Amino acid sequence: MKQQEAKRRRQRTTGSRLPAAGKPWWRAPMLAVAVVVLAAVAVLSVRQYWGANGAEPAAGREGGVLIGGPFSLTDQDGRAVTDADFRGRWMLVYFGFTFCPDVCPTSLNRNSEALDLLGDKADAIVPVLITIDPQRDTPEKLKDYVHFFHPRTVGLTGTPEQIAAVAREYRVFYVRAEHGAPDQYLMDHSTFTYLVGPDGKFVQFFRHDTPPQEMAERIKALL
Ligand code: NI
């Protein structure tokens, strides 16, 4: 009799994962463990997102959000470059692609105009185009393209993984948009230009519609 009673009690307690009515939630072990695990995951995610662990020295903040970071890419001459190669110089970074019909050329022209307005001061700044279309934008393709804009523009490409990593660090969005023939696809992408300081840290960004005069003035105030 006693054994049967114990067995029934076991079945009752293990039969349902929800706490019995009137029983505090923290008395249900599975639920309590789940709550603690979820809370830990949430705290770690927040720390990661806001960079509270300080593990990303080559980055800056915008409204509390960490932007920028280290990268490992290939330039238009086929050389391997990292963010460290730009230390001591400012970078004006734009993410785009050479096949872009209008937005990228407009942004890159605007950036060149802003640099021209800065005169000799612009010598301290390296204009950089990082492609978000590494499949078509080989170093050769970038080399043919970047000289249409500022003559000192550095074009950077990489493996899809390397591009995804640097885009993630700069919070850059991009997605392939089919457009007729398979090799005629376009890329939807964010259109900010990022100013990175000589220490490799992000300083500020410029919207696509910021005029070159305003951009030059804002940069001049920082140099
Ligand atoms: Ni574009």
Image (cartoon, rainbow, N blue to C red):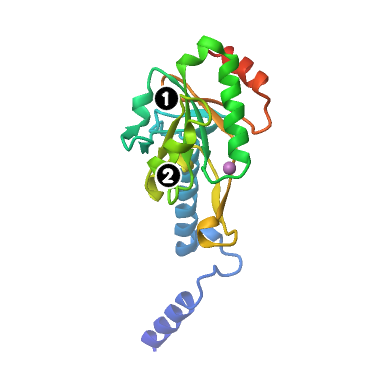
Callout 1 crowding tier (Cα within 10 Å): few <14, some 14–19, many ≥20? many
Q: Residue furthest top?
A: 120
The residue that disc 1 covers is 200
Residue 84, image quadrant: top left
User: Which quarter of the frame holds ligand 1?
Assistant: top right
Q: What's the residue at 66%, 18% (across, down)? A: 213
Q: Is residue 118 visible?
A: yes
Q: What's the residue at 45%, 81% (across, down)? A: 11
Q: Determine whether 100 is above or below 128 in the image.
A: below
Q: Toward the viewer: 172 or 116?
A: 116
Label 2's element?
A: helix
Depth check, mark 2 against mark 1: the one in front is: 2
Q: Toward the viewer: 50 or 208?
A: 208
Callout 2 crowding tier (Cα within 10 Å): few <14, some 14–19, many ≥20? many
Q: Is residue 72 visible?
A: no
Label 1's element?
A: loop
Q: Residue furthest bottom?
A: 1
| Tag 1: amino acid | Gly
Q: Along the horizontal axis of the image, is 219 left or right of 28?
A: right
Residue 102, image quadrant: top right
| Residue 157: % across, % down | 41, 41
Disc marking residue 163 = 2
* Among the two numbered marks 2 and 1 on one chain, the one whose residue lies closer to the N terminus: 2
